[in-house]
Amino acid sequence: MKRHSFQLTTFLLACACVLTACSSAKKSCCSPLAASASAPAIPDRPEKLSFPPFEFMPPKAEQFRVALKSGPVAYVAEDRELPLVTLSILVRTGDWVEPDGKEGLTDFCGTLLTRAGTESRTAQELEERLAFLAANLSSDIQGAQGTISLNLLSKDLDEGLAILREVLTKPRFQQDRLDLQKRMTMQSMKQRNDDSANIEAMEQGFVSYGEKFWDNRHQTAASVESISREDLQAFHRRWFFPGNFIVAASGDFNRADMITKLEKLFADWPWAGALPPPIPQDVKIAAPGVYLVNKTVNQGRVSLMLPGIRRENPDYLPVLLMNDILGGSGFSSRLVNRVRSDEGLAYSVGSVFQGGVYFPYVFRAAFQTKSRTVAYATSLIVEEIKRITAEPVSDEELENSKHSYIDRLPRNFASRGQVVGVFAGEEYTGRYQTDPEYFQQFTARIKAVNKNDIQRVAKKYLTPEQLVILVVGDKEEILKGHPDHAAKLTDLGGGKLTELPLRDPLTLKPQVK
């Protein structure tokens, strides 16, 4: 009992000392409010918060660029954070060099290059060795670019590069893997018309750029069946050689040592190869009007398109900002506010106006809505297009858009792997050669855009009378319109409505009703 009384007395005395010290101090040690009295007051609203200016200067390509004596240009950066190495090879090839009647050859070559064995290993043996090394080796060819990627532990780099060399110079294109790829492709083609999104994507390409444009040459049952192992070998030997490669390498290595290894990787190539011809730019957008594909589904998919621009256009950055305000910035964009937030007509709505690298990419606004509200929602998109051409955007809209682009810039350079990847892409597409200071000047150029620039490019490129409107959905329900709204699909697109037939999924020829 005495022991407990002593402990209680000691505790009370300690508390008294603390209270006395706190009360006699000039600045209370007990009150958090008093302790922070000299600190700036916390704003009562988020918009009153202020931060120091954010400044970011991207690295320069020259820090990482090296022209290898063996042929390729390489971007090489050390990154010791993890014991890994990542190597990517960009290949100047793509669908535009695909022979007529062999549509699908580039896709097959890109897929099977790293999945169908080598001279010394069957496909299964290659997969098993890569799995043992915990390495990832992949390849593909999409549009206007081929890519081969290798990721593995740095301790296995030499073996990984030896495997990569054999894949690049002595691919087997194993017949059973080719046959499997054909069967998988045929099954996929049979399902082309099952999803309205697939129908929309294909028809959008046709009305945006023309059916004969190289990027619209899709594989058919006949073209797939015609692809042989010899076709793959010939295509590979024509385009896969060091003079067609751009390399990005990052990871746990000494930079000088890695450059030496890359020289060895590409030295003494067994064949010369050929440089590809220029990428065709002969796009031909459809005549203004509404184009309707009848597909019995609950909702209609709508795309509104206009002729686009290339990335090298002087209006490129003002166009990016203008589109960001119109429909590219998610919930802060005008299209989302009008069509989704105000009217509740669509879950997803927005617009894209990217400058094309090799040919002009069209402007596209798109959404999905109930069949009966297709016409009304489309009319709202047209209204917003007209509004941004007629009225200056607000200061707040422009500043928010600028900050969005400026604040996203550092994300492109967050790691050494991203840095060399970005610069390899710039080398491949040619912007490094024409505008080597693009990223260093990006922020200043964005800041220089004003409201007059936004309205000028809106008037110049967003021309409602040229709209090409593609609709995929239930024709009967869509043409009825909505009883609460006067808008009719036949009143849009200058009153011109063209019905596009569904295509046979295996031949892509229009189906006969």
Image (spheres, rainbow, N blue to C red):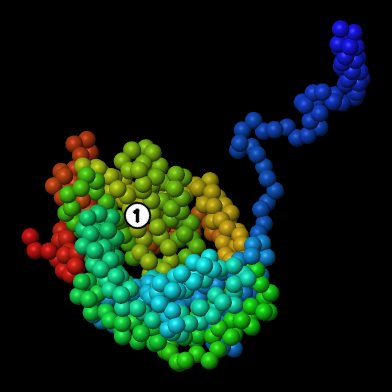
Q: Measured from the top left, where is residue 204 in percent x and y?
A: 28, 62
Q: Tell me what residue is drawn at x 42 percent, y 51 percent.
A: 326
Image quadrant where residue 42 sits: top right
Q: Is residue 314 visible?
A: no
Mark 1: few/some/many CA within 10 Å (<14, 14-19, 20+): many
Q: Which part of the image, by quadrant, shows the N terminus?
A: top right
Q: Measured from the top left, where is residue 223 in percent x and y?
A: 23, 76
- Towards the viewer: 426 or 79: 79
Q: Is residue 359 left or right of residue 189?
A: right
Q: Measured from the top left, where is residue 48 in percent x and y?
A: 64, 37
Extreme residue in the left direction = 513
Q: Is residue 408 left or right of residue 63?
A: left
Residue 51's place in the image compared with 45, above or below, is below
Q: Which part of the image, by quadrant, shows the C terminus?
A: bottom left
Q: Tell me what residue is drawn at x 44 percent, y 70 percent.
A: 127
Residue 108's place in the image compared with 327, above or below, is below
Q: Tell me what residue is drawn at x 62 percent, y 74 percent.
A: 76
Image quadrant where residue 338 sits: top left
Q: Give, as a three-letter code, the residue at label 1.
A: Ala
Q: Is residue 464 visible?
A: yes
Residue denoted by label 1 = 365
Q: Measured from the top left, where is residue 486 in percent x and y?
A: 21, 41
- Towards the viewer: 166 or 461: 166
Helix, strand or loop at disc 1?
strand
